[in-house]
Amino acid sequence: MMTIESPDTPSARSGAYPPARTRRISGRKAWPAAVAAAFVAAQLVLVRPGIGLGWDETVYVSQVSGHAPAAYFSAPRARGVSLLVAPIASWSSSTPLLRVYLSLLSGLALYLALRSWRGLLPTRVVALGGALFASLWVTLFYGPEAMPNYWVATGGLAAVGCFLRAQADRTPRGPVWGLAASAALMAWMRPTDAVWVTLPLMAALVVVRRWRHKWLLIALVAGLVAGAAEWVIEAYVSYGGLGSRLSDASRIQGELRWNNAIDDQLRSLSGRTLCRPCTGGMPHPVVFAWWFAVPVLALAGLPAAVRARRASLTVLPLACAATAAVPYLLFIGYAAPRFLLPAYALLAIPVADTLVLLVTRARGVWRPLTVTVVVVGLAAHLAVQGAVLWRLVDRTTASRQGWARTADALHRHGVRPPCVLTGNNGEAPHIPIAFYAGCASAQTGGADTNTTASALARAARRTPVAVLTTHGSRPPAYARTWRLVHLDGQVYAYLSPVARDAEAAAPGAGRQSPTTLPQGARTGVR
């Protein structure tokens, strides 16, 4: 049986951490809560609750929203996020309200994840680990977003903490139930990610004799099964079976096979939410220096952990972080920083452990020098994260405001609910614009195919249909006689006759100024 002594006991303090002269345990227990509260406040201030919904967010939210028809739900997606936002999205279309709700929930999730590590390491280590993870620009940006990766990250951090606490003392039921709930949360959000994150836990329960714990194994398996059950059932109902859904998911993600995506991830760290294809030069080394420092610092604390007989507290989160990162570093042909959030969360605790050890074990003249280096390094890290986040929020806000303007222009041209938008997402992102306009989205090709050209042509006879495109692009055959209008920026639309009639019948239509198109904009019309 593995035993892990409390970091506040004399025997534990005689290991890796020197005794403190004055210990205020009750106050330090509040540190994780303070970190979670600061995380919520930072989201509300820096990410702006009014920022519009992103592309993937509109897919998840539309499944439960009364604002727009449900967008096509492709094979890799799971419905955890949709159910998470349902308490707000099912009755309100207010994006600021949804952002505040998700910010509060993300703060609570971070607190519970840190609380699962209580008694395993000093509170200051756990709180610092939470602060390091929460201060990453990718964590701050995706905490209030309706996306699954942050929830897999906090679920993974909580799962490892509960696992270790249960191994330390096999009598309490809390950690066992916590492990089951954490596994279910991860599988609820992204079943495949949940499997990758928990592989080391499963292996430890099966291979390491002193870690074999019947109820832990049952809790872990039951949690994964409970969280993934809906996804598996849906696979047989809507995707032709589990194997077919996994195959479709692989195809949509560019075929999962050996592919070194490390350079893609580095390029995305400059604030690119999706790097597909991931072209262009590398950002300045200052932007991604932390990415290399994190695993080095996490591993640097391992010798001290071994000497203190608590190696599992470092090895297990490191192993789970590695398996969580494997598919996104080695098997996928593109990058998004959010993919690695689970790995960052799991690495944060060992990194914090190393930093605290560096400061507390330094003696003499080395003490002030070490403190200075650590403080300056953390300050520089925060400055870089803040700068990337600031630019990303500005750029994202402008992009999503453009989608809202396009939706307003469609309404002025008679494309109002019930309506349908289609097009080539490489030219104009009709899926999120359809959500903003309250329309259904239709796709006749690519990963999100959910209809046919003939079906769209039939629908256009009775409802407003718009084909979004860019200047000079040729329309599909069924829309070659439709009217071309300019909506916003580089976005144009071919409008079905029903939309034209709705525009003419709208109150004040005769007073609207005619749409001005650049010379040659109608060259694709037949």
Image (cartoon, rainbow, N blue to C red):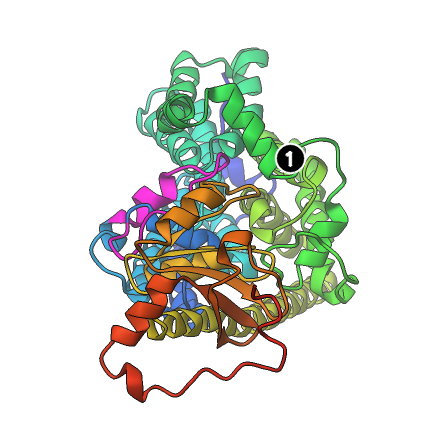
Instruction: Report whether 484 appears left or right of 144.
Output: right
Highlighted range, magenta: 65-86
Question: Which residue is at the far left?
Answer: 91
In the figure, 21 relative to 252: above or below?
below
Q: Is residue 139 visible?
A: yes
Q: Residue at x 53, y 51 (%)?
A: 129
Depth check, front residue: 88 or 372:
88
Q: Quadrant of the C terminus?
A: bottom right
- Which residue, given by chain and number where applicable, does mark 1 sit on? 327
- Position in image of residue 59 (x %, y %): 41, 49
In the figure, 321 relative to 4: above or below?
below
What secondary structure predominates along the stretch shown in magenta? Answer: loop
The answer to whether residue 70 is magenta is yes
Q: Residue at x 39, y 70 (%)?
A: 410
Depth check, front residue: 218 or 251:
251
- Position in image of residue 25 (x %, y %): 38, 51
Instruction: Report whether 343 appears left or right of 440.
Output: right
- Position in image of residue 165 (x %, y %): 43, 30
